[in-house]
Amino acid sequence: MKKPAILIAVALFLASCGSKTESNKEEYAKPDEASQAETTKVDVIAEGEALTKASDCKTCHHLTNKLIGPSHTDVAKKYEFTKANVDYLADKIIKAGSGVWGQVPMTAHADVSKANAEKMARYVLSLDGEKEH
């Protein structure tokens, strides 16, 4: 007598697993391009943060306080978060510079790739809450 009840329960279970409605399929749809792009930007900024924290940047820069160089937050406030400024700051990270924030020159980081320098610049420019445009 137990066998028919078990068979019915298994059949109902299997039937419910195999019947996906359109709304269930939507749950598994791929994210749209806009959300993928936003996720990618967040990932790049997180990578930039990790690169910055692992580098010698903290010798001269602090997140919020001026040390030898400006705070990273002050850099974010000074420069608009644009592709042009990402390129500009990435070049400064790699080639160094002086005069913008005082007479103490920034050390060059020739061993940092352009791609990684851009990630670091994006992280720094994100610190004032601005999004890249």
Image (cartoon, rainbow, N blue to C red):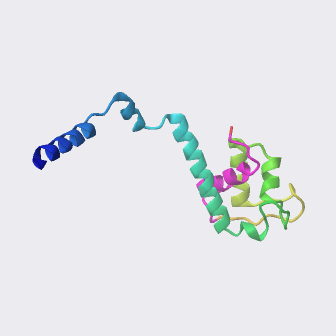
Taking the view exactly as shown, the residue that stands out farthest to the top is: 22
Pick out the residue farthest to the front: 1
In the image, what residue occupies the spot 71% across and 41% down? 82
Q: Is residue 95 above or below residue 129?
A: below
Q: Nearer the viewer, residue 86 or 94?
A: 86
Q: Nearest the camera: 43 or 87?
A: 43
Pinpoint residue 98: horizontal percent, then vertical percent.
83, 59
The stretch drawn in magenta includes residue 129: yes
30 relative to 120 in the view: left or right: left
Query: Which of the pair 39/120 is nearer the observer?
Result: 39
Place of residue 133 in the rendered image (x, y in percent of width and height, measured from the top left): 68, 37
93 in the magenta segment: no
Identify which residue is drawn at 64% across, 68% down.
Answer: 54
Q: Is residue 81 above or below residue 49?
A: above
Res. 114 visible in picture: no
Residues shaded magenta: 111-132
Residue furthest out toward the right: 102
37 left or right of 118 in image: left
Q: Nearer the viewer, residue 129 or 122?
A: 129
Looking at the image, which residue is at 67% across and 62% down?
52
Residue 28 at what x, y percent from top left? Answer: 39, 38
Residue 35 left/right relative to 60: left
Question: Which quadrant of the structure image shows residue 19?
Answer: top left
Q: Residue at x 58, y 41 (%)?
A: 38
- Percent x, y of residue 27: 42, 37
Q: How many marks?
A: 0
Observer able to see residue 37:
yes
Q: Is residue 40 above or below residue 60?
A: above
